[in-house]
Amino acid sequence: MRVELQDISKRFGTVQANDRISLTVEAGSIHGLLGENGAGKSTLVKILSGFITKDSGRLLLDGRETEIRTPADAMKVGIGMLHQDPLDFPPLSVLENFMVGKSGSLLMARSRVVRQFRELAAQFNFDLNLYAKVGNLTVGERQQLEILRLLSLGVNTLILDEPTTGISAAQKDALFAAARKLADQGKSVIFVSHKLEDVNQLCDRLTVMRQGQVVGNLPVPCAEAELINLIFGHELAPPVKPPTQRDQIALDLENVMLISDRLQIRIDRLTVNQGEVVGLAGLEGSGQQLLLQLCAGLLKTPTGQICVNGQNLTQQPYPAYLNGGIGYSPADRLREGLIPGLTIQEHVALRTPAKSWFIDWKDILDKTQRSIALFNIRGKPSSTVERLSGGNQQRTQLSLLPVPLNLLLMEQPTRGLDIESTLWVWQQLIARCEGGTTILFTSSDLDEIMQYSDRVIVFSSGKMSQPIDASQLTVDRLGQMIGGRFDALLNADSPPDYPTPEIAKQSTKQNVMG
């Protein structure tokens, strides 16, 4: 289906989210929509999919002008959207979720629905258990289920909104293969992303947005430098972290245990120095999050001791860790780091120590305005956090961390952020290190771990390596270690057996929980 958007505009209060946007998506093509966080991409596709109504402009489908005011309107004309966090019902089974939205009797022939599901799943090589609870699926599997459901409802234009955040390399390959198959069938695919490598790998053509406007329409592939200039209007330079002077121990773990229902890892001794950055690498659920939670006081160890800046915090309650200058920034910003429904100003109020029974809202407003300016948050004190873009949610979360901190623990500090926001986050983190803060962080991006870490700890198959100087590692060797080859450093010249370096590198780019 050919989709034409002509002069689409949308304003939220004083913010012009879309300003006379025009683009055309040809039938049988994959069209990329690229831009920094907050550029207006999500607003535009939500207008097309009926989740937001436009203020002005025209929408043409195969040359016929169409009005879309609700998601049901969009589905009727063959437009469906796969959200970054799929819209499903976790307590229900895969089959029950697949049936959502289908017309007909509640007692529709179960065998017919099962047959349709299996035929579609086989067509796209999706391996899903019909009777598994959706709440037990990975993000990638939930995406596959939602794609099958939308296709079964007759979708001819599929919108993929930041779909590669939090999925494994194999799931990403399956997703891209499905998108190409849909294009081969004459359907149109709109791929929303801020990842340059993804759009160059998948798309036929792309539209670049900046500050609510279209700034470029280009064929693919494109030169990375050209795309960066279009997206941000200027070149980007990564921050440089000076070498750490390792002369004072900031974190000292001795004879502690990391315990979950699936893992049990013993740490005989681990010391991290003041101002040092230690990257934690590994596949999802390998123990990285357990280590961060232990150091944050959210997880207890039955043995050993935990010392931060010489203070013994073993078995102390969580407030003792806060008072010890320890900050924790979780990966899931809206579920664990921020509170949906509350404004930026209300978050600042929660983080400000109370001096009396009453809140000085004028003082809180002043602090909020300073934070917004300092962290370049695109929002107002009255903005609720769920209305902010991913990058601005992360900036807000960082602004709430106390200054100074002795130890900063971060899960996926740049997940879902565009290049400029990623560099900005690391500028802030490096500045904290120079002030004496020690950082432990997880990342699903091996390049990020290699670039910013002084030392790296690898988690694999219930094991944890000793800290390794980043200068001794390459991305290939790190990938081999994540795959279970802890001897990769000793056999640096030998070819990898499992996984291969590229597979190892890509397989870690998933939703690493710890």
Image: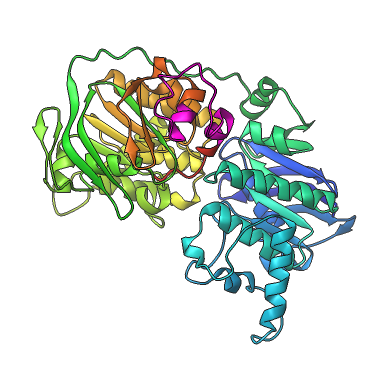
Q: Is residue 500 magenta?
A: yes
Report the residue at 73% width, 63% height from top: 120
Query: Can the viewer see residue 369 in this picture?
Result: no
Please say which color scheme the image uses. rainbow
Give percent across and percent down for residue 23.
79, 43
Q: Residue furthest right?
A: 63
Give percent across and percent down for residue 88.
55, 65
Magenta span of residues = 478-506
Q: Left or right: 96 with respect to 324?
A: right
The quarter of the displayed image where residue 60 is located:
bottom right
Is the stretch drawn in magenta largely helix, strand or loop? loop
Q: Is residue 165 magenta?
A: no
Number of numbered markers: 0
| Residue 218 vs residue 118, the one in the foreground | 118
The quarter of the displayed image where residue 63 is located:
bottom right
| Residue 441 vs residue 44, the one in the foreground | 441
Q: Left or right: 463 with respect to 128?
A: left
Query: Can the viewer see residue 391 in this picture?
Result: yes
Report the residue at 72% width, 78% height from top: 112
Report the residue at 49% width, 66% height from top: 90
The quarter of the displayed image where residue 1 is located:
bottom right
Query: In the displayed structure, would residue 183 be above or below residue 199?
Result: below
| Residue 271 vs residue 264, the one in the foreground | 264
Q: Left or right: 309 with respect to 236?
A: left
Report the residue at 28% width, 33% height from top: 408
Give percent across and percent down for residue 272.
24, 25
Give percent across and percent down for residue 213.
69, 37
Image quadrant containing the C terminus: top left
